[in-house]
Image (tube, helix red, strand yellow):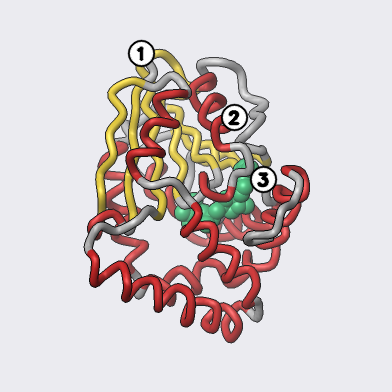
Amino acid sequence: FGHEQVSPEEKTRRVRGVFSSVAASYDVMNDLMSGGQHRLWKDRFVRLVRPRAGEAILDMAGGTGDIAFRMARRGARVTVSDINPEMLAVGRERAKARAIEGLDWSEQNAERLTFADRSFDAYTIAFGIRNVTDIPAALKEAHRVLKTGGRFYCLEFSQTRWPGFATLYETYSRRIVPKIGKVVAKDEDSYRYLIESIERFPDMAAFARMIEAAGFARVKAEPILGGLVAIHSGWKI
Ligand code: SAM
């Protein structure tokens, strides 16, 4: 699965398996693995999206709702979409417990959305795109479902340009993350897959070109921690 050759259908099936396995411990694991940092990255991401009251936003690969909740609190109408029903089920429970309103939930594959053309004011995807088998297809779909003037935002791991930090992070992610996964999520292999998918993902410039190729204009990439994480954005004009 990591470096093994598998068909696109098989890859999508296995990714679904990874998230079914980690759904229950997903939120705790994020805090543990990032030392709580992912909350700050998500806050920053949503500040950049600037959701406004009444806007229709599609949060793709929305999982357990971290991004969607932040946007709904600002009054946006958010459709949380994910290929994995277990992740969405955890999200629904969390939304209920926190009494967050303005959310719709929809099981979707990012590569083939069932939404009509020009349905949304903004499209967000956080730590989701690298799990998608056919990324160009997902970017095209993002472009299709956005209204003219709509915004695209992607938060994803990338490669840090700080040399010492890069080495430190590599050791941490390859040696320690799978062990945390083993103890907490009882699933070392899924976390090994997640780290490998980060290492295989295109760098900031290459990913920006893919977004442009899908038809987006004014594409920007904003590095966090030297590019360990990056926010890409673009406009449908
Ligand atoms: N956005 C959430 C967050 O930031 O906490 C969840 C991110 S989680 C790391 C990645 C999510 O992508 C999982 O919930 C997974 O089910 C979803 N996913 C993977 N492949 C997908 C696809 N082809 N279409 C839609 N969602 C997908």
Of all residues, the one furthest to the bottom in this rendering is: 183
C-alpha separation, residue under disc 3 versus residue under disc 1: 28 Å
Residue holding disc 3: 83
Question: How many residues crowd mark 2 within 10 Å: few (<14), some (14–19), many (20+)?
Answer: some
Query: Which amino acid lies under the numbered mark 1 shown in the image of this protein?
Result: Ile
Q: Quadrant of the C terminus?
A: top left
Query: Which amino acid lies under the numbered mark 2 shown in the image of this protein?
Result: Ala
The answer to which quarter of the image holds residue 41 is bottom left
Residue 31 percent across, percent down from the top left: 42, 72
The answer to which quarter of the image holds residue 47 is top left
Whether the residue carrying mark 2 lies under 8 Å from ligand 1 is answered with no
Disc 3 or 1, which lies upstream in sequence? 3
Q: Nearer the viewer, mark 2 or mark 3?
A: 2
Query: How many numbered marks are there?
Result: 3
Q: Is residue 38 left or right of residue 125?
A: left
Q: Mark yes or no: residue 99 visible.
A: no
Residue at left offset 63%, top offset 61%: 2
Q: Nearer the viewer, residue 157 or 89?
A: 157
Q: Nearer the viewer, residue 42 or 221?
A: 221
Determine whether the residue tagged by mark 3 lies in a helix, strand or loop: loop
Q: Which mark is residue 237?
A: 1
Residue holding disc 2: 137
